[in-house]
Amino acid sequence: MSSSNTQFITNQRDFESCLGSLSSSNVLAMDTEFVRTNTFYPNLGLLQLGDGDGCFLIDPLEVTDWSPFKSMLSDASKHFIVHSAGEDLNLLWAEFGVLPANLIDTQIACGLTGLGFSLSYQALVAELLDIELEKSETRSDWLRRPLTDSQLDYAALDVLHLHEIWDHLRTKLEQLKRLDWLAEESTALKLITMAAEDSSNWETLCCDLSNAWKLSEPALKNLQLVCYWRELEARERNKPRNWIGSDRDLVIVAKDCCRPGKTIAQQIHDNPDLDKRFKSRYGSKLSTLLEYPEWQLVELDARDLNRPLPPVMRNALKACQKIIRARAEQLDLAPELLGRKRQIVQLLQDVQKEGLQAWPGVFSGWREQILAADLKPVLERAL
């Protein structure tokens, strides 16, 4: 490693010592390096923590007790700076069941200060600090040991500049009076992370499949079962969902197993449209599942299906997008941060289902303050 401000931690004793060194700081920079090429859950390869003066690179393969770190994460007096925190939060929640009590996502902060949406860490360092960072280890294997000096240098740089970047962004957010907006977005990001691991939400995953709305009621019930099964299977085997079965295969199974004349096992075995490996590996299990369901799942509401918007709602979508782009330009905000297309579609689908009481929905909080006067008339005309 080239930096004297960086320490590589490779045992439990030094891990606890480094956490003790960081305990006096209320603002910590954090990043993770992981591998997720053929697994459902990311495999943690390195944890980086910094206090603004230096950083610790922690080898997770050598840590036997994570409880001191989990306590630090949940400490309400501490704030953790992370750039583009989504995947890091997913890893922390899956691995430790704990998220930072206070999160500062510098990528979201960029969008709120007019620097742009989805700005990479390298681009942000170049923009604010005029420093060019190497990208040579972006696709590195972080599980292979020993880690190289190049890998460790790259990992250290991912946190060494975060405090200085946050100083710039915080000053701008204070001037714009948008610190509360950042806090709202950080809280929402954590809630999304936890919701993804809430098994009750897996019961309605079938509603998101693009062709689910075309299915008959019996076929939709089948699809609900096989989607829920795939989620459990993917997590239990720690494999990507599509490695278990594609959306297309699940829809085919759900639809064709409702046809009369053959048993469910025959329908699956004889279907030429199904992936051969999928049939061979899971055909028997799926036929048993559909014949004798293992779970009593929540009753689906057809209005929750991801169906195309009707013409009046498509016109409302365009009107909402135009309003959001104009307001974002006025406020020097990234339009995608103020309102993404999928958020607008979700709002319009909710309004179709529940009427105007669905407002503000996903546009609550700071977005409601900005958009209510312009969007509510559009929603009223769409009903």
Image (spheres, rainbow, N blue to C red):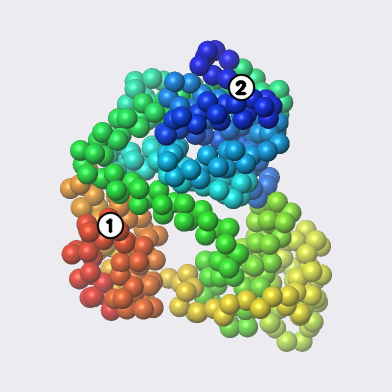
Circle 1 residue: 367
Residue 143 position, x and y percent, is: 68, 32
Whichever of callouts 1 and 2 sits on the residue coming sooner in the sequence is: 2
Residue 373 placement: quadrant = bottom left
The residue closer to the viewer here, 195 or 101, is 101
Q: Residues within 10 Å of mark 2 (few under 14, many from 20)?
A: some
Q: Residue at x 65, y 50 (%)?
A: 40
User: Could you say which quadrant of the image residue 165 lies in?
Assistant: top left
Give the amino acid at mark 1: Arg
Q: In the figure, is residue 383 to the left or right of 258?
A: left
The residue most toward the bottom is: 260
179 left or right, relative to 107: left
Does residue 51 appear to the left or right of 204 in the view shown? left
Examine the rendered structure and indicate whether residue 86 appears above or below residue 1.
Answer: below
The label number, if any, that marks residue 8 in the structure image: 2
Taking 174 as reference, is 49 left or right? right
